[in-house]
Amino acid sequence: MFRIGIGHDTHRLAPGRTLVLGGIEIESELGAEGHSDSDALCHAITDAILGALCEGDIGMHFPDRDPRWKDADSLELLSRVMWLVSERGFRVINVDATVMLERPRLRPYIDQMREKLAGVLSVEMECVSVKAKTGEGVDAVGESRAVMSQAVVLLQLV
């Protein structure tokens, strides 16, 4: 049996915050605002996995009103969700994700993100696709006011 999940996440960008995507710190004047480290890529993948498992969303498992998750490492949250994957008898087959950010350019960081995510997802790096797109100057992403990520995951019952 296979299960597919789709995830999405958006965070405002602001000065004085660190920009973290896929567990990698990105050199940037603006960082993502939020309760945790605001890693929009990890959050989208986490939501995709939870969707495939029919287990709600990231806010249900790690509510932003709970002080335990203040400044939480989103790779750790993803790791906790991977425990659910294993507990339910599934494994990740592959992930396809897109990060939308006007600047900085993410190409130099993509392979590092893929490697870090593959480790947490217990798959080969070749099973994790991360793409980067700009907003072409349009909307909150294009105006450098937000970072947005989308992800699709395929799980298989083992």
Image (cartoon, rainbow, N blue to C red):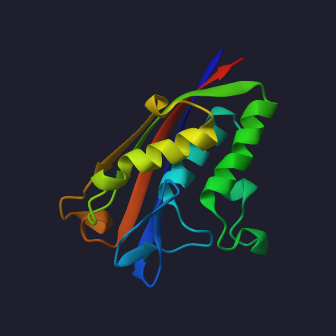
- Residue in front for this viewpoint, 28 or 152: 28
- Residue in front for this viewpoint, 24 or 46: 24
- Residue in front for this viewpoint, 94 or 63: 94
Query: Would you identify the image quadrant in which residue 68 lies?
Result: bottom right
Q: Where is residue 2 in the image (x, y as percent from the top left)?
A: 61, 19
At horizontal 69% and vertical 33% (from top left) the residue drawn is: 53
In the picture as drawn, the residue positioned furthest to the bottom comes out as: 16
Say which quadrant the N terminus sits in. Answer: top right
Relative to 152, does residue 133 appear above or below in the rendering? below
At horizontal 67% and vertical 67% (from top left) the residue drawn is: 72
Q: Position of residue 158 (x, y in %)?
A: 72, 17
Relative to 113, does residue 64 appear above or below in the rendering? below
Q: Name the side, left or right, on which 144 lies relative to 69.
A: left
Q: Name the side, left or right, on which 103 lies relative to 47.
A: left
Q: Can residue 150 be seen in this view?
A: no
In the picture as drawn, the residue positioned furthest to the left comes out as: 136
Query: Would you identify the image quadrant in which residue 104 lies?
Result: bottom left
At horizontal 60% and vertical 47% (from top left) the residue drawn is: 46
Q: Position of residue 19 (x, y in %)?
A: 44, 69
